[in-house]
Image (spheres, grey):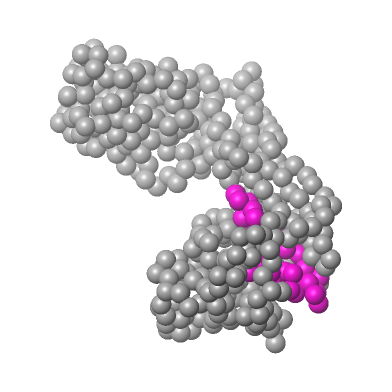
């Protein structure tokens, strides 16, 4: 299973970026290979419109099964993520990535429904 | 001749000026007044006229034909607005992000994205004496003002015989809708007020008009409140102030009742007269 996090940096101890579409980084943890990858999403600031769909498309290309974020995606992104079959968990906005993963494992995050 | 009445800051008196000026000038001239503030048009509150034409207006967006699609992804690559994304087994189109450029539709190798009509608003044409009043309204939930403004300008060109004075009541701000509303204007009148907000947003509007190489002047409304910074700014930057409309409770009261002002407030009429001379080049 691949878990994607919206993040303010590229490290395990980086903080969660509460925003979805305009997140600075996406960090992806693969629970099978235990691999950890980061994707720099900062070019998104050049998009005046449609940041949500664009970042959702990146999540789809990465092949993430689960998204862990802060506030939750907006309507446009949520439609795409739903179509892509990504499960979304919110409420991790004040956590570091590793804390957010623990919270997810302990089922402490909120399931996001459109 | 096309005159755009724009501002920068909202609520400085664009509509008050546009409607009163239209009515005043119509005593001598044929006038077309267009309300291009399509997100909340309100000139119609002051120009009560007889409706002679109404038409729904549409924009074109791509509609996905699943059976014809090969998921090649060209549509997504050519879209500058992230309005279409390819999810491998599904193409998602976001109508509110689409700018109707046709690129995805035209470049689709299997013609799986034919353009389709979507209603985005209503155009209404009224007549009162020498005034043709055109109101353009965007439907609730529609996000793009620019195509509606462009269509309205096309309509105005279609009814104009190039002899009228065309007054364009523009949206506030300095973003795309304002560019669209002012880009074909021969002259732009920027309405502001003598306050720090008025000065700040006037500065942005001036920069915009300079970039567009527009012939523009300033009308200072509610003269007497605030301070002299707007006048100093205009003097320093060689910007002509063609009228200073005194602040007046009576104007506000008339406006709040949806009434025209110039036939009841003499100082307002004098300001309109200065503006008339500027427009007619006297």
Q: Is residue B120 left or right of residue A17?
A: right
| Residue sitting farthest toward the bottom | B282
- A108, B14: nearer the viewer: B14
Quadrant showing the C terminus of chain B: bottom right
- Where is residue B129, by image quadrant? bottom right
Residue drawn 62% across the image and 80% down it:
B267
Residue drawn 72% across the image and 69% down it:
B22
Q: Is residue B14 above or below residue B237?
A: above
Residue drawn 45% across the image and 22% down it:
A114
Quadrant showing the N terminus of chain B: bottom right
- B101, B30: nearer the viewer: B30
Q: Is residue A10 above or below residue B178?
A: above
- Where is residue B139, by image quadrant? top right
Q: Is residue B47 left or right of residue A39?
A: right
- Residue A19, position as x, y percentages in the image: 33, 35
- The answer to whether residue B265 is magenta is no
Q: Is residue A96 left or right of residue B121?
A: left
Residue A59 appearing in the image? yes
Residue A4 appearing in the image? no
Q: Which residues are magenta?
A: B17-42
- Residue B259, position as x, y percentages in the image: 68, 63
- B165, B268: nearer the viewer: B268
- The answer to whether residue B35 is magenta is yes
Total number of numbered discs in the rendering: 0
- B224, A2: nearer the viewer: B224
- Residue A75, position as x, y percentages in the image: 46, 30
- Residue B4, position as x, y percentages in the image: 63, 67
Q: Is residue B199 above or below residue B143?
A: below
Residue drawn 64% across the image and 65% down it:
B254
């Amino acid at each position: 299973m691949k878990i994607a996090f919206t993040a303010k940096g590229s490290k395990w101890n980086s903080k969660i970026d509460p925003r979805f579409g305009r997140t600075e980084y996406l960090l992806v943890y693969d629970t099978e290979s235990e691999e950890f990858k980061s994707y720099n999403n900062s070019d998104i600031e050049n998009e005046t419109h449609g940041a949500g769909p664009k970042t959702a498309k990146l999540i789809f290309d990465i092949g993430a099964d689960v998204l862990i974020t802060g506030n939750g995606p907006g309507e446009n992104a949520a439609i795409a993520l739903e179509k892509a079959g990504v499960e979304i968990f919110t409420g991790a906005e004040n956590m570091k990535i590793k804390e957010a993963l623990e919270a997810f494992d302990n089922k402490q995050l909120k399931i996001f429904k459109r | 001749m096309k005159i755009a009445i724009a501002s920068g800051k909202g609520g400085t008196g664009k509509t008050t000026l546009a409607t009163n000026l239209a009515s005043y000038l119509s005593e001598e001239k044929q006038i077309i007044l267009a309300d291009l503030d399509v997100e909340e048009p309100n000139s119609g509150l002051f120009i009560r006229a007889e409706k002679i034409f109404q038409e729904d207006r549409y924009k074109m967006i791509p509609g996905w034909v699943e059976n014809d699609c090969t998921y090649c992804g060209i549509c997504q690559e050519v879209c500058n607005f992230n309005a279409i994304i390819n999810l491998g087994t599904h193409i998602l189109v976001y109508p509110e992000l689409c700018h109707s450029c046709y690129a995805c539709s035209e470049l689709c190798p299997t013609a799986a994205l034919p353009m389709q009509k979507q209603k985005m608003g209503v155009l209404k044409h009224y007549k009162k004496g020498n005034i043709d009043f055109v109101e353009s309204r965007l439907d609730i939930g529609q996000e793009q003002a620019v195509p509606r403004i462009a269509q309205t300008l096309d309509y105005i060109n279609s009814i104009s015989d190039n002899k009228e004075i065309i007054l364009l009541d523009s949206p506030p701000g300095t973003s795309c809708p304002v560019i669209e509303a002012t880009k074909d204007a021969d002259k732009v009148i920027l309405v502001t007020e003598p306050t720090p907000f008025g000065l700040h947003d006037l500065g942005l509007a001036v920069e915009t008009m300079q970039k567009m190489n527009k012939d523009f002047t300033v009308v200072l409304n509610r003269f007497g409140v605030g301070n002299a910074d707007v006048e100093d700014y205009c003097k320093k930057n060689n910007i002509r102030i063609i009228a200073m409309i005194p602040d007046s409770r009576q104007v506000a009261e008339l406006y709040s009742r949806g009434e025209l002002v110039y036939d009841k407030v003499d100082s307002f009429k004098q300001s309109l007269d200065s503006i008339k001379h500027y427009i007619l080049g006297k």
